[in-house]
Image (cartoon, coloured by chain):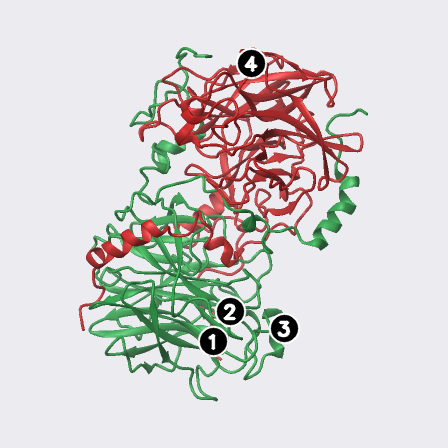
Chain colours: A green, B red
Amino acid sequence: MDETQDSGSFPARLAKDKPVDRPISAATARLYDHWGAQQDRTNPFYTTFHYSPVTGIGRDDRVSVSRRDPSKVLKIGDLYHVWYTRRITSVPPVGMDRFEEADEQIPAVDWDLADICHATSSNGFDWVEQGVAVPRAPQGNYGDRSLSTPDILAWDGKFWLYYQCFTTRWRENDCVSVSAAWADSAWGPWTRVDRPVVMRGGRHEWDGCAIHDPFPLVYKGQIWLYYKGTPVDRPPENLRLAQGVAIADHPAGPFVKSPLNPVTNSGHETMLWPWRGGIAALLSLDGPEKNTVQFAADGLNFVPKAHVTMPPQAPGPFCPDAFADKGDGQGVRWGLAHINPEGGGGDKGCHLIRFDCNLCDAGRPEFQKSNILYHEGTWLQRVLALSPERKARILAQQAIVDRQTVLGP
Amino acid sequence: MDETQDSGSFPARLAKDKPVDRPISAATARLYDHWGAQQDRTNPFYTTFHYSPVTGIGRDDRVSVSRRDPSKVLKIGDLYHVWYTRRITSVPPVGMDRFEEADEQIPAVDWDLADICHATSSNGFDWVEQGVAVPRAPQGNYGDRSLSTPDILAWDGKFWLYYQCFTTRWRENDCVSVSAAWADSAWGPWTRVDRPVVMRGGRHEWDGCAIHDPFPLVYKGQIWLYYKGTPVDRPPENLRLAQGVAIADHPAGPFVKSPLNPVTNSGHETMLWPWRGGIAALLSLDGPEKNTVQFAADGLNFVPKAHVTMPPQAPGPFCPDAFADKGDGQGVRWGLAHINPEGGGGDKGCHLIRFDCNLCDAGRPEFQKSNILYHEGTWLQRVLALSPERKARILAQQAIVDRQTVLGP
């Protein structure tokens, strides 16, 4: 066997502190300066995600039903509670590109013509849909078009649902503010506030269009409502999407936006949770720091702490200390997310699934694997397969653009 | 409609230079300091990947055939050439945990009892397998067990194949050095060097076990052979895997390892290519910087430049200037990769697929999407689904560990 002798190259066993007696590469320096010398294995911010179907609010092939954007999951007594966007229409959405064809029966997008629905479970896998918690307002009133993407706050003995609130016909660009409803019990009845509670920004500001995916936490004695913002116009020189936070002393507002907004440069439906005195966040899908777990000791200045793969879409975490404000946040072990049976752009509505994880260091060391290798159906699914149109174009072009590596016969 | 006025919050239109007249968050500062203010859209290192089945060397359901770890793709005349690991055995591998059951007919792992095989294509999608290029050595000789994970170098009128070279019975821990074979033509015949060309490191060094996935480029007038290294023992305090580089003036060596090794802290089968005077790399699957495109202006000090999703596994790029050493590397538009029909840990052998991409800025602006949403089969495949065992354990534990969010009935 070709045994070789130690020759002074970098040791297998990593020194606790950054070596100063030898040259190291930029990559090794980052291990010590940023990631932790042990790579992912001892990084509390690293986790794998594993998924389970759920009953009651899972796959539903009726035309056209969608359940999506689950709230945080609360545990009250022996029951788990979740709220989510539910649409039941006689036809599927026409899509953002054809929004002008939408009417009072025809949805523009998956979260159009929707209400806020409620479900409960005794084990987090099997759910009972309890029906609509907050319906759209009567025709002609604020919030008559669609209520979507709810999240929940418990504050001062009351429950508050925050949601995107669409009025009148669907418009281009998905522009909307956040409204709310409150109740004395998780079972309702809910009273709509019937006005915007967190307003979208001005026309030329980063959050001038969408204020999506409200995510309230209690932090430093106040209500911190994180949200996804998008500008009205989206030429390349405009920010595409990012996350901001608005802070209030009362659930009905006024909400004051942080002067540091936006506080993330990436992510889509960002999940957040209190952790060791700060706020941790799972960013996915979009932006240069997509698919990272980040941490902000002050809730505002987020730093990437781990790269993850296959994070849940639109996750709603079971986070028992979301409102405790005790500075000892213990993390997230599971929650609900949504998927579409056909993937992005599919005609079918979304449905909910459960995710399990170990964020951060939440007592599940077996959720630490990497090198996860996907099956053939993953690589060749519609959103990843090279389309026939692109293949034809590539075949036509490559005879011209593919230069020879080596000249020869 | 709830129009609001501009109120002085962060503008939609991003200033070219980092704002100095207002507070910004750490995330916004990183956009300017590191990622580029335009997020992924104008980042030359960002790409999506799209996949296509191939014929001739694609899916093969015979028991037990595996084609994996494709080399770079060369274009010579009108033909594309690729080399890869091929195993044809009468039974599937027993697996790393049961390697002691392997014998001269029974493979331990997917790349055991394999030879280096050659295929050609006129369009990169449809391939003709030309047969074994470099077979294992006769029994009792160096390299009699398995040759795997080849890559190709063209140098001074000759072709060189580098590969992992296993001798005698399979051993625990996959320890191996790199050997080589040479030919005057891409069609062979190939002459084996029959000795290690790049040696694994000493027992206590970071590359003391595996020297896997050799990847030669011509750079600064020399042969730069990047490789994946792993230590012999893998307790948590040891580096798990990383990439190093060994440099030579002649393809048969001697290869001198860089004193900066390891030069990455992440990645698995890392693909590299010359780009604007430096070396770019696609790191995937493992480590804190998994799924990033990185760049090293000096070939040694790599820095993450973009986060990507679903990068190809074990990619072999078509990279026409891999050996040109002209300092104007133009990037990678396509190549071959391997997948397993069942995903990681499946019994079936791997097969090859084609990937298309735009690395870096290689004239395919349509490969820039983000927010890619996968289909149901992705989330619930075996490697991502919560296993029945874990579900049972979680059901037993959560009644105890899941605290109430809100006290109440």
**Residue B139, numbered circle:** 4
Residue B12 horizontal/vertical position (percent): 51, 61
So how many labels did they put on this image?
4
Q: Residue at x 62, y 25 (%)?
A: B116
What residue sits right under mark 3 in the picture? A98
Q: Amino acid at mark 4?
A: Gln
- The label on residue A349 is 2
The first of marks 2 and 1 along the sequence is 1
CA gap, disc 2 and disc 1:
8 Å
Label of residue A87 in the image:
1
Q: Are there few (<14), some (14-19), or many (20+) residues within 10 Å of tag 2?
A: many
Which three-letter amino acid code belongs to the residue tagged 2? Answer: Gly
Disc 1 crowd, CA 10 A, few/some/many (<14, 14-19, 20+): many
Whole-angstrom CA distance, mark 1 to mark 4, is: 67 Å
Q: Could you tell me the amino acid type at mark 1?
A: Arg
The answer for how far apart the CA atoms under marks 2 and 3 are is 17 Å
Q: Nearer the viewer, residue B40 or A359?
A: A359
Chain ID of residue with mark 4: B
Label 3 resides on the chain identified as A
Image depth: mark 1 or mark 4 in front: 4
Tag 1, which chain?
A
Q: Amino acid at mark 3?
A: Arg
SS for dot 2: loop
Considering only vertical position in the picture, is A64 above or below B59? below
Which one is nearer the viewer's eye here, A98 or B104? B104
Mark 2 and mark 1, same subunit?
yes
